[in-house]
Image (cartoon, rainbow, N blue to C red):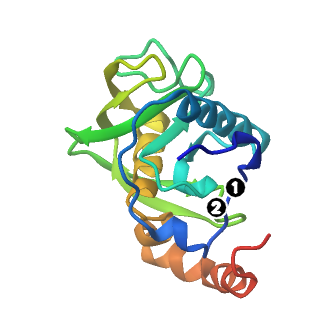
């Protein structure tokens, strides 16, 4: 399935694609073009991660760019930032830390909705990069959180599903407003 990267746009809740489980894909030149366009869309929206379902594609692919600064470091062990955008094709998560921590999250597909989500503080992800090579990355901090958030999108899971109950109740009027708009922003 060839996709025109220029036709991509961020999809908003409650569009159905955001609730569907994505399938594995082969890395092709078109998939690479789509991934690079996703990086552009993510940056235009001032985000730090974007998954293929968020642009209407049922692919197991996401992009992340966590700049260093504000306590984030690419040289930390494990790293908490990236040295530029990373592309994850057919990612697999493993070895989550036992330490859990709540932190406020937002989502480009859920504008204006923010709330605390409890996640492991570290995670390991194995994926294929744009060079066609499988790689494994152990991540911590915001990088680990972002990886888990984007990975959730590949399974049709939104922050609404993971948000602590008190915050979920607080954002309920915003969620209903998005539902009334039917994914149109």
> How many circles with numbers are drawn on the protein?
2
Check whether the beta carbons of the residues at disc 1 and disc 2 lie within 8 A of each other. Answer: yes
Name the image quarter holding residue 67.
Answer: top right
Q: How crowded is mark 2: few (under 14 residues within 10 Å), some or many (20 or more)?
A: many
Residue 136 in picture, x, y percent from top left: 30, 23
Residue at the extreme front of the image, as rendered: 1
| Residue that appears at 40% across and 42% down | 25
State left or right for residue 175 relative to residue 63: right
Residue at image coords 22%, 39%: 94
Q: Residue 109 carries which label?
A: 2
Residue in the foreground of this view, choosing between 14 and 46? 14
Check disc 2 and report its element: helix, strand or loop.
loop
Q: Where is residue 6 in the image (x, y as percent from the top left)?
A: 76, 42
Neighbour tally class for label 1: few under 14, some 14-19, many 20 plus, Cα within 10 Å: some
Mark identifier at residue 88: none
Lower position in the chain sequence, tag 1 or tag 2: 1
Q: Nearer the viewer, residue 136 or 32?
A: 32
Residue 30 sits above or below residue 105 on the image: above
Q: Is residue 149 left or right of residue 50?
A: left
Q: Where is the C terminus found, in terms of image quarters?
A: bottom right
Residue 148 lies, with reference to residue 40, above or below; the image says below
Q: Position of residue 179 (x, y in %)?
A: 66, 84
Q: Which of marks 1 and 2 is in front?
A: 1
Label 1, secondary structure: give it. loop
Q: What is the spatial separation of the Cα atoms under label 1 and label 2, in whole angstroms?
A: 7 Å
The residue lying toward the viewer, choosing from 142 and 127, is: 127
Does 118 sit above or below residue 72? below
**Residue 106 seen from this side:** no
Residue found at x 79% / y 40%: 44
**Label for residue 10?**
1
Q: Can residue 181 be seen in this view?
A: yes
Residue 129 occupies which quadrant of the picture? top left
């Amino acid at each position: 399935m060839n996709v025109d990267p220029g036709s991509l746009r961020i999809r908003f809740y409650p569009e159905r694609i955001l609730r569907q489980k994505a399938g594995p894909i082969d890395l092709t030149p078109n998939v690479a073009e789509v991934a690079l366009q996703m990086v552009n869309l993510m940056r235009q929206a001032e985000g730090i991660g974007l998954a293929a379902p968020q642009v209407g594609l049922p692919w197991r692919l996401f992009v992340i760019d966590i700049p260093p600064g504000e306590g984030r470091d690419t040289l930390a062990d494990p790293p908490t930032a990236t040295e530029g955008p990373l592309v994850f094709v057919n990612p697999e998560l493993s070895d989550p830390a036992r330490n859990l921590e709540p932190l406020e999250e937002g989502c480009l597909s859920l504008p204006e909705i923010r709330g605390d989500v409890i996640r492991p503080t570290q995670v390991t992800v194995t994926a294929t990069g744009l060079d066609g090579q499988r790689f494994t990355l152990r991540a911590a901090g915001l990088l680990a959180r972002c990886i888990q958030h984007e990975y959730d999108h590949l399974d049709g899971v939104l922050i609404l599903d993971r948000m602590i109950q008190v915050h979920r109740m607080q954002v309920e009027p915003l969620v209903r407003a998005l539902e009334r708009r039917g994914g149109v922003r």
